[in-house]
Image (cartoon, rainbow, N blue to C red):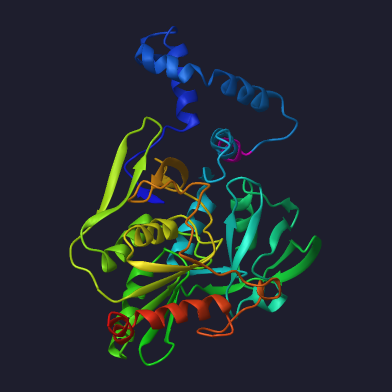
Amino acid sequence: MIRKTALFLATLLLAVALMAGAQASKTGPNDTVTITREEYNRLKQYELVDEVKQYLDNYYYEELDNQKLLDGTVQGLLSGTGDAYTFYYPQEAWKTMWEEDEGKYAGIGVQMLGSYDTPAVTIIRVFQGTPAEAAGLRKGDVFYMVEDLEVTTATMQDAVKLMRGVPGEKVHVEVLRDGEILPFDIVKAEIIVNRVESTMLDPQIGYIALYEFAGESYADFKNAYDALKEKGMNTLIIDLRDNGGGWVEDGVQLADLFLDKNLLFYTEDRAGNREETYVKDGKEDIPLVILVNQNSASTTEIFSGAMKDYARATLVGTKTFGKGIIQSVVELSDGVSGFQFTTAQYFTPKGNKVHKEGITPDIEVTLPDELLHTYFQLGDMADPQLKAAYDEALKLLPAAAEAAQH
C-alpha cells in the first residue's frame, strides 16, 4: 500500500449540501450557491442517494444516526468496485489501522489475509503468548463468525473491530478447520507485535524472519542484519513465509539493501500509464536465500520477484499468493477517517505479471499435510522448508562457492 494524504474526496454530505444549495439559488440572492455546470452534473448523479436519505429522515420509524448512514453510504460506494482490497475506514477503524501499524493494540493476536478471488479470510499467523494461541487458534484456520458477524473479505474490517477493544473483554470467534466449525471464546489482551526475529543457524549462516512490512520493520530488519554480521554471518536466509505484505516503501528499502541501482518494479494503471520504481547504488554482497509460501503476498512479492529476476537470491518454498495490485491509503478531509483503494497493478523488473500468478520459487519444497499447522521454534531444522533453505545456503558460503569453481 502507498501512503497518500494529499488526495481528499468530497463526502456525500458535501455533495448533498451543494445540491441543496444549487436548488436554493432560485429563492433569492442570500441563498445562492454558484457552481459550474460540470460540477452540478457531477453532483446530480447522487440525487437518488439524497432522495433515499430524505425518506429515511422523514419516515423511518426510529431516529437514525446520521454519521452511520454516511459511513454506510461511503462503504457501499467502495463495495461497488467488487474489490476485496478497496474499503472504507470510518473513524474507529481508521484509528485502529494506525494502531496496528504501530505494533501495539488490544486484541486476540492473529494476522489475517483475505483472498482476492473468494470471500475467505484466513489466519496466516498466530502470535506467541497471545489469547489466540492460548485458545487454540491455528495458522490456516478460516474465519467463519466473529460474534454475530459472518466474516468475509467484505466484512473483514468489521471483524477486526470486534476483535479489538479493551483488555479483559470477551469475543466469540468461530473458524472453519478441516470442514468443521470450531467455536472459541477469547479474552482480549494487550498485543505487542514482533515483526522481526533472527538467529545464527551455524557460525556462518544467519536467519531473519520478517513477518510483515509495517511500522519500523525495515529498521528492525537492519538492526538484526547488522547484529548477525557482527557474529560472523557470511550467508543469510530471509524468511518471508506468511508475510502478507504492507507498506511498499518498506519493501523498497529492503531491496535497496541488497541491490545496486536498478529497476525494482513498475506499475500500470487502467490507462496503461507506467511508473517505475528504482533502488539506489550501494548493496550488501552477502549471498541470500529467500523462503516464501502461498501466504507470501503483495510487498513480499515485489521484493522476492525482483531478487529472483536479478538472480540475486535463491527462492525456496512454494508459489506465492499472487496479490500483484497496489492500494493507495487516503485520509479524508474530516481528518478522522479514510479509505484504501486499488490504483494499479505491478510487474517484476522482467515484466512478469504477479496478480493471480504469484512468484514461483527456484526450488519448490512443500510441507507435508501433518506439518501444515505445526509451529516451529525459530531456526528449528525439523521445518523441511527451512532445512532445504539451509542446504542451499551452505552451497552459497564463500568457501563452498570457491571450491565449486575449481
Decide whether residue 66 is among the magenta residues.
yes
Instruction: Give coordinates of residue 206: x percent, y percent.
Output: 38, 83
Residue located 69% across and 64% down the image: 141
Asked if 399 appears above or below 174 in the picture, the reply is below
Query: Is residue 242 visible in this depiction of the protein?
Result: yes
Assign the magenta stretch its main secondary structure: helix
Q: Which residues are magenta?
A: 65-70
Which of the two residues, 120 or 155, is positioned nearer the viewer here? 120
In the rendered structure, does residue 392 fall within the stretch colored magenta? no
Which quarter of the figure has residue 200?
Answer: bottom left
Q: How many marks?
A: 0
Can you tell which quarter of the image residue 29 is in?
Answer: top left
Please give left or right for residue 384 compared with residue 308 in the image: right
Decide: is 336 above or below 271: below
* 90 w.r.t. 259: above or below: above
Task: Give x and y (percent) for residue 54.
Answer: 62, 23
Q: What residue is shown at x 46% (from left), y 25% (from top)?
A: 15
70 vs 224, nearest the viewer: 224
| Vertical comparison of 44 with 219: above or below | above
Res 216 visible: no
Is residue 231 rendered to the left or right of residue 117? left
- For the C terminus, which image quadrant? bottom left
**Residue 236 locus on image (x, y percent):** 37, 78
**Residue drawn at (50%, 24%) of the image:** 16
Spot the residue most to the front.
406
Between residues 210 and 80, which one lies in front from this camera angle?
A: 210
The residue shown at (35%, 62%) is: 307
Q: Nearer the viewer, residue 231 or 292?
A: 292
Q: Quadrant of residue 179?
A: bottom right
